[in-house]
């Protein structure tokens, strides 16, 4: 079992730097996701882990094995990719087009490994395609073969570079869960690079968010979703209702009235008396029918309704003009229609960010 | 001889259903015209009787000719691969000083007609025979391998080599086991084009006195005592050329399999050569460019500066240039007229009939000039003596020979125009021909012009057909050069050679771009 420890990692030089003094610990046997927009440096990080790029400074360790170290104060070391015991599943698979499926899987194995190849192909559900050529396979099948090829030499770490992004939605979700199930059952340490927040949250044990070459936050998917480090990250990880507020005594007063911001929230104190934004997820809000004259706290009008079956997201324009999304139960309950008057109430604990 | 672009991936420009009858008839007319020279040779051969044909085939001289030509093809193709593949790698993957210059240097030898190169070497060195011809032909045709290999290596997905690294291969083996196989189809297709070029070449083997097919056919036609012999030899030559064309098509048709998915848009990381290896790389490219371009150009310049006993007759040069232009222009106009229906059919429809018309129209691609010349001489003498050695016969031969260039260029242009424009014009009250003229024709004019220009410039430097079919007394640049070298008046031939190189540089540049673009576009259209 091998974890990955990255310390003080810098890539590129001066103003051209792509990664800045980055620390990251990937637990052994877990699936970790590096989440970031394009240009955030996530691909560079993956390429450094694979050994395709030499870091300008910092160290990379696989378990207790140093595979890269550079810069002042660091041991000088660079293990080339072929000696790292690392497997990679590139974007769109990058199968060798001149080799058959089984030759692709056997590329990293000693000669006469037919039984191992067969076992790997069975494992990824491609047992009957051993003789096929890559161009005869669909995108999803190519990715399965690419995974089998990467796993064949039993690498310590498997790197996945946006492996599902070229697939259509339905296939993406299915292959994603299959691949994760497989990696978990093998207990392989895996690092997945993605720009898709839903993908990162749904499959990873640990998510590290990368922005401008720095890690903004790393933690479990739930921790990231419920306690994002800043407003930008909160927006990136899912839909948000943002409400201008003033904090008094652990309560944020906004157009929904007083919202609890959590006693364990140290920032609540820091923002005491200041102008802030209180952020709630759509599922932390609840709709009800207006009573009386409709001038109560949280009153608003529905502007748009998106019905998804299992639930629905209703956009509400509050009296002060703020628009917020509210998630309501789906199923047989019809969501309110545009134009309908509603009242929004906060049911969860809000997060505070400076305005 | 450019690779026929008919297997290029085309945008969704097809129409469903049958093509209009008039267009189909026009296309069939073109196909018949393109097939006439070959057909007539077949008629002549069958008229001679089986026994005569067998006699010629079993003749020792025939077998020697086949042996010489095949040996020449093998040697030149081998040399082009040995030179072209490493050169392609250097141009694609190494950090080189003045890289753009070396790329141009590797493309420009295509601009030197083989007989001009042979003349330029002859003017300085007393060379002749098989190995001299092999050297000259290698120097003018290695770009057919080097350019596609460069393009293939530049566009191959660098992720392949990276994956191979993670699977335990070092840098060198990662390259040889993953990227190099991607470049093989390009190299193989290029090698077959070289083979076709060598087989069809007349100028170099004639000047260097190698008894390859083309020279033997020409001399036995000139001696005019053995017309059956020339005909049979020509048919054997065409069969070999057809084999090469079919093989080349198959490789190119299969090439799409060699790329999976769109891949990433990343370029491979260039290799930093240091010290000795960099010196060797630059020395290699300098030597190659020096031999392929430097020697001919310097030789011509020296000859021009030295002057000759007979001073240059500017009037003669000008009139040769005008004549070259005139007959080539007639050929180009005819080629474009013949190409238009075929190009429109094949860009829009894919019925078996259209495929057949297109394939037959490409016959010229597999016909060496000597063969077309021979057939047209026989045909005009037998059927229409008034057309013998007329501009019309010459223009027709040019048109047949270079029709593939015109079709290719017009077809790509037509395929890029969405047919819905023409259909919309129809709904707005235009008849079929007026709708076509108002929409598709308008937008394809640049492609038509390019096709015509390509035929014009190629025809202007054509040698064997011009020698055999020109009206008596009509001298072109190519025939002037030929007759002057025939009497070893090397000095007075230099200005003609120079003019021909300048003319040829234009289509060579276009061809270089086409070869490069075609292979690079593989990545865009999987």
Image (cartoon, rainbow, N blue to C red):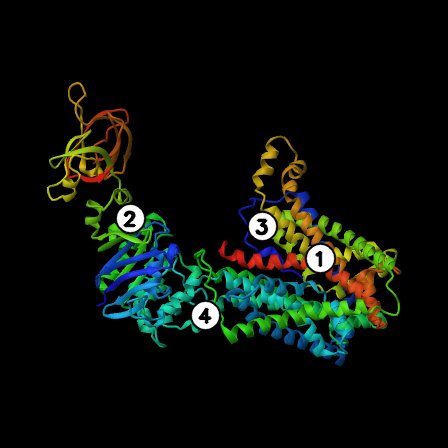
Secondary structure under tag 2 reads helix
Q: Residues within 10 Å of mark 1 (few under 14, many from 20)?
A: many
Q: From the viewer's perspective, is the residue at label 2 or at label 1 nearer? A: 2
Identify residue for label 4.
B175
Identify residue for label 3.
B350
C-alpha distance separating marks 2 and 1: 58 Å
Identify residue for label 2.
A197
Q: From the viewer's perspective, is the residue at label 4 or at label 1 nearer? A: 4
Secondary structure under tag 1 reads helix
User: Which chain does the residue under circle 4 lie in?
Assistant: B
- Point out which mark residue B402 bears: 1
Secondary structure under tag 4 reads helix
Q: Position of residue A73 (x, y in %)?
A: 28, 67
Q: From the viewer's perspective, is the residue at label 3 or at label 4 nearer? A: 4
Q: Image height check: is B231 above or below A213? A: below
Asked if disc 1 and disc 3 are in contact, CB closer than 8 Å, the reply is no
In the rendered view of the protein, which quadrant contains the C terminus of chain A?
Answer: top left
Secondary structure under tag 3 reads loop
The one of A108 and B146 positioned closer to us in this rendering: B146
Asked if disc 4 and disc 2 are in contact, CB closer than 8 Å, the reply is no
User: Which chain does the residue under circle 1 lie in?
Assistant: B
């Amino acid at each position: 079992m091998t974890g990955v420890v990255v310390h003080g990692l810098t890539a590129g030089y001066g103003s051209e730097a792509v990664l800045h003094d980055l620390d990251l610990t990937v637990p052994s046997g877990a699936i970790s996701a590096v989440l970031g927009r394009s240009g955030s440096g996530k691909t560079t990080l993956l390429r450094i882990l694979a050994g395709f790029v030499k870091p300008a400074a910092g160290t990379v360790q696989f378990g207790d094995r140093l595979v890269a170290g550079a810069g002042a104060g660091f041991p000088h070391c660079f293990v080339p990719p072929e000696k790292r015991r690392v497997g990679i599943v590139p974007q769109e698979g990058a199968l060798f087009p001149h080799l058959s499926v089984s030759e692709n899987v056997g590329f990293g194995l000693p000669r006469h490994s037919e039984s191992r190849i067969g076992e790997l192909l069975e494992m990824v559900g491609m047992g009957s395609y051993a003789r096929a050529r890559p161009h005869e396979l669909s995108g999803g099948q190519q990715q399965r073969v690419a995974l089998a090829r990467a796993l064949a030499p039993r690498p310590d770490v498997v790197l996945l570079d946006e492996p599902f992004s070229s697939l259509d939605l339905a296939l993406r979700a299915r292959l994603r869960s299959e691949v994760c199930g497989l990696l978990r059952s093998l207990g392989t340490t895996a690092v997945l690079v993605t720009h898709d927040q839903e993908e990162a949250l749904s499959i990873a044990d640990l998510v590290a968010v990368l922005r401008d070459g720095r890690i903004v936050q790393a933690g479990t998917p739930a921790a990231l979703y419920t306690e994002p480090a800043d407003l930008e990250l909160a927006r990136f990880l899912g839909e948000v209702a943002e409400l201008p507020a003033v904090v008094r005594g652990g309560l944020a007063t906004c157009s929904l009235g007083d919202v609890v911001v959590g006693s364990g929230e140290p920032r609540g104190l820091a923002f005491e008396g200041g102008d802030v934004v209180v952020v709630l997820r759509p599922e932390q809000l609840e709709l009800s029918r207006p009573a009386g004259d409709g001038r109560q706290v949280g009153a608003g009008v529905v502007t748009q309704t998106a019905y998804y079956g299992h639930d629905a997201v209703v956009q509400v324009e509050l009296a002060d003009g703020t628009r917020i999304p509210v998630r309501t139960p789906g199923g047989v309950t019809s969501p309110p229609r545009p134009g309908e008057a509603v009242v929004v109430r906060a049911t969860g604990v809000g997060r505070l960010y400076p305005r | 001889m450019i690779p026929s672009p008919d297997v290029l991936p085309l945008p969704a420009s097809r129409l469903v259903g049958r093509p209009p009858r008039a267009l189909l008839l026009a296309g069939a007319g073109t196909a018949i015209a393109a097939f006439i020279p070959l057909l007539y040779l077949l008629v002549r051969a069958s008229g001679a009787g089986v026994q005569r044909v067998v006699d010629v085939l079993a003749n020792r001289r025939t077998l020697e000719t086949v042996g010489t030509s095949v040996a020449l093809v093998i040697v030149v193709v081998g040399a082009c691969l040995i030179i072209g593949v490493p050169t392609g790698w250097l141009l694609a993957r190494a950090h080189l000083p003045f890289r753009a210059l070396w790329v141009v240097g590797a493309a420009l030898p295509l601009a030197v007609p083989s007989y001009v190169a042979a003349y330029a070497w002859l003017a300085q060195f007393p060379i002749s025979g098989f190995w001299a011809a092999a050297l000259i032909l290698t120097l003018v045709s290695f770009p057919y391998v080097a350019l596609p290999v460069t393009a293939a290596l530049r566009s191959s997905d660098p992720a392949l080599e990276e994956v191979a690294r993670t699977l335990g291969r070092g840098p060198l083996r990662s390259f040889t086991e993953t990227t190099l196989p991607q470049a093989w189809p390009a190299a193989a297709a290029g090698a077959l084009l070289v083979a076709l070029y060598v087989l069809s070449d007349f100028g170099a083997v004639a000047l260097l006195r190698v008894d390859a097919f083309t020279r033997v056919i020409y001399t036995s036609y000139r001696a005019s005592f053995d017309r059956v012999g020339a005909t049979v030899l020509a048919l054997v030559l065409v069969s070999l050329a057809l084999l090469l064309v079919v093989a080349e098509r198959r490789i190119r048709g299969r090439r799409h399999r060699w790329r999976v998915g769109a891949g990433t848009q990343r370029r491979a990381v260039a290799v930093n050569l240091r010290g000795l290896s960099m010196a060797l790389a630059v020395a290699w490219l300098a030597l190659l460019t020096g031999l392929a371009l430097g020697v001919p150009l310097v030789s011509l310049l020296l000859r021009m500066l030295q002057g000759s006993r007979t001073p240059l007759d500017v009037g003669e040069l000008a009139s040769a240039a005008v004549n070259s232009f005139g007959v080539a222009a007639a050929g180009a106009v005819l080629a474009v007229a013949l190409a238009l229906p075929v190009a429109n059919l094949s860009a829009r429809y894919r019925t078996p009939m259209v495929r057949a018309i297109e394939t037959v129209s490409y016959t010229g691609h597999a016909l060496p000039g000597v063969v077309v010349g021979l057939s047209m001489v026989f045909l005009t003498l037998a059927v229409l003596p008034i057309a013998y050695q007329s501009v019309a016969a010459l223009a027709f031969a040019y048109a047949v020979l270079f029709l593939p260039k015109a079709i290719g260029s017009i077809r790509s242009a037509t395929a890029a125009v969405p047919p819905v424009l023409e259909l919309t014009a129809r709904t707005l009250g235009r008849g079929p021909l007026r709708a076509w003229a108002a929409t598709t024709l308008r937008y394809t004019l640049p492609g038509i012009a390019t096709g015509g220009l390509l035929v014009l410039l190629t025809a202007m430097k054509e040698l064997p057909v011009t020698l055999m079919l020109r009206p008596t007394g009509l001298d072109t640049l190519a025939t002037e050069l030929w007759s002057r070298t025939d009497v070893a008046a090397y000095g007075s031939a230099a200005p003609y050679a120079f003019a021909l190189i300048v003319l040829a540089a234009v289509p060579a540049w276009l061809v270089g771009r086409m070869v490069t673009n075609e292979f690079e576009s593989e990545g865009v259209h999987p």
